[in-house]
Amino acid sequence: MSVTSSDMTMEQLQAEIAAGRVDTVLVAATDMQGRLQGKRITARFFIDEVMDHGTEGCNYMMATDVEMNTIDGYELTSWERGYGDLMFVPDYSTLRRIPWHPATVMVQCDLAFIDGSPLSVSPRQVLKAQLERLEKLGYSPIGATELEFALYNTGYREAMAKDYRNLEAASTYNIDYSLFGTGQVEGYLRRLRNEMDEAGLYTESAKGECNLGQLEVGFRYTDMLATCDNHVVYKLGAKEIADQEGKSVTFMAKPNDREGNSCHIHMSLRDTDGTPVFPTGHGTEMSETMKHFVAGVVATQHDFTYLYAPNVNSYKRFADGSFAPTAVGWGWDNRTCAVRIVGHGPALRFEQRVPGADANPYLASAALIAAGIHGIENQLELPEALAGNAYTQNAPTIPRRLHDAVAAFESSEVARHAFGDEVVNHYTHAGRVEMTAFDAAVTDWEVRRGFERL
């Protein structure tokens, strides 16, 4: 069973607006950092102007850093080019209620130039391009993302005022699988589960994790575009509901010295008839298609790590014995490997364990699909599985710094063949912007270490 990312039709929206039950429409698109950006539009204006024509927004939205600073060096936009507009083109298959705000619905958009031509570097378009390539081979991907976050009893404004130090975590010890531990934050978790269901997601469960205040809410699989659309709605909602409750959450990959926040991605393929193509029966035997696909994921792990781990902080999460993988390879139900094969029969699938919670789901999913296509088209042979503790084996490792991951992505022939020069150059520049900002920063660690001693 799969679900769509919509819980409302256009006819229902028009009726809700006419009846006065909806007064606000959020028109949203995902930026390079995987965040929803857009406008809050009055219902009447949406019906009169936006519904059939979309709306405009400055093209700098696709050329900023994490702090929304305008950055030079992008082909798309600059001061010299005048920072013109892009079109928000609504995709009404994503129309949904936003229950944590009264009388509010959201529609997610593709970004396009004013002449209607698609913006190839927009994350949703990057994924759609890979979906089209895979469709030509006769396959469509389904999957789910497992997104961890840390919950604090300290609100966002207070956290900022405290310079993000000495925040009160929502748990005081490891509550992984603890019902008592999650029961202590059930007020927040209950809202999160139920209101995500009301927003058109299919919530499965919630559980505690290892780090203090760390939690995970699981959602049912669906097609990968809807999975990514749901993912970014969930991240926004998790933050906004926390804010309403006087709390805060972070999706940083490594918010402190303990365990990091992951975003494991599960994926499998179906053919044009909707039949699973990864299993050969009801057991765990992989089809040749699955072997080639997973071989492609393993073979491009080094090239594509940047799309799974896009920030300086992402690489702090990778550590031996941390459940965050460091070894390039795959294993049978082995959580020490970058790629884990799990399930059986129609549920046979792979899990990519490298992405952190800070990953852009569209870009990470696009990377997996491009990797799988590379494996299928070149009939790559699946290497031997890693057995036992992959951290202690003599296996190649993923890049351990953003600098190395960006360089690998930039020089990758596979990446340029799959995504095109425009996309590779755009996101390579984004990586360099992130590195430059970090290299110029004086960290607390440097001050504590050297203030008196040096």
Image (cartoon, helix red, strand yellow):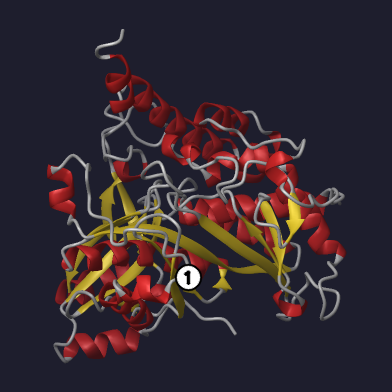
Q: What residue type is labelled 1?
A: Tyr
- Rendered location of residue 194, percent (x, y): 33, 82
Residue 147 as seen in the image, left or right of residue 28: right
Picture quadrant where residue 275 is located: bottom right
Picture quadrant where residue 70 is located: top left
- Say above or below: 186 vs 355: below
What residue is drawn where x is 54% and y is 41%? 318
What residue is drawn where x is 78% and y is 72%? 277
Report which residue position mark 1 lands on.
177
- Rendered location of residue 288, percent (x, y): 87, 63
State the residue in front, 405 or 334.
334
Say if residue 280 shows up in the picture: yes
What residue is drawn where x is 46% and y is 41%? 314
State the residue in front, 215 or 242.
215
State the residue in front, 2 or 383.
383
State the residue in front, 244 or 22.
244
